[in-house]
Amino acid sequence: MAEPVLPVVEVEPPPVARVVETALDVRRLSYAYKSRLALNSATFSVAARSIHGFVGPNGAGKTTTLKVLATLLKPLEGSVRVLGFDVVRDYKAVRRRIGFMPDTLSMYRQMTVFECLDFFAAAYGMGLAGRERTIKDVLALTDMTARQHDLVRSLSKGMQQRVSLARCLVHDPELLLLDEPAAGLDPRARIELMEILRELRRMGKTIFISSHILAELATLCDSVTIIDRGMIKYSGSMDSLLSSEGVTVTYRLTLAAECPEAAEALQKTEGVASVTKDDDEPVYRVTFYKQRLTTNQVLAVALGANAQVVAFTKGVRELSEAFMDLTEPGVPT
């Protein structure tokens, strides 16, 4: 049976292996939709062979940035280099080396999983024998071998996300650009997706991931960029961000026994931002504003509620706390 006629995809021949230390280098990037400035002189970089988180409120400019990196939008100002190539001048070289997974599923749902992957592999110029071998490997990596003959439209959201990720891998890209890959997934599917991403990093891939699931990014990513209203608020290692102090500080309060009265008293204390409890132990994370409360005052509240305090120690900052400190409230206009 003759192969179907495929659309022309502007790609170059398979690239010669190169070693780069910086996967993404974004300098003073700006982009506007008519009169609204979506990106305002954004600057950040991403090390090769790392997992980099990209977070921000809705409308902050995350998807616009991803589209520029994927050569789908041209920068209004500034320069963007992907794996050493300029996204405007060398767009063909960039497209050959990246795998872009948008926030909406972009697949032919009337095809089977195998047919879908075969179509995209052929569009990248891969021969029949090479396609079959590569698709087999990609299906195994994403744990979709048993579902390869199922129609895409018959799969659950989590399974379709796996197929979408597999589609990004068929041409063996060096860099993955993932826009909300875990959106709508159940907890198990999210955990399995994160394990796949860790395996891809072990294989030498660079992963740039935009997500609102901050707790998972904190454990997954080596580094992170926080963007708000088109401007970069932080870009650097995850450890540096979580070890630094912002407007709030978090302490770990360990009690000898459960004391809901103490938790309630702390939650009612002006200047306390949040109180969260460990599910299994009488341990609380107390986050409070440094300029409004001292550690002694917080401890006094707990003791005043007859809590039997075993320890009161400074805790590790959570990504959500850093996010709230660095971003502004409200919807950008």
Image (spheres, rainbow, N blue to C red):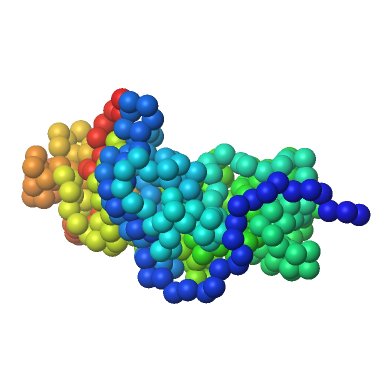
Q: How many marks are shown on the rendered structure?
A: 0
Name the spot of residue 139 as percent of width and height, x first.
70, 61
Query: Could you tell me which residue is drawn at 79 percent across and 48 percent down?
Result: 5
Q: Is residue 256 visible?
A: no
Instruction: Classify the position of the C terminus by image quarter.
Output: top left
Figure quadrant of residue 105: top right
User: Is residue 64 found left or right of 16 in the rendered image?
Assistant: left
Furthest residue toward right: 1
Q: Nearer the viewer, residue 51 or 260?
A: 51
Name the spot of residue 211 as percent of width and height, x first.
44, 46
Query: Could you tell me which residue is drawn at 48 percent across and 49 percent down?
Result: 70
Query: Could you tell me which residue is drawn at 77 percent across and 45 percent down?
Result: 111
Query: Could you tell me which residue is drawn at 70 percent across and 46 percent down?
Result: 7
In the rendered image of this protein, does residue 162 appear above or below residue 35? below
User: Is residue 133 found left or right of 267 in the rendered image?
Assistant: right
Figure quadrant of residue 288: top left
Q: Nearer the viewer, residue 215 or 255?
A: 215
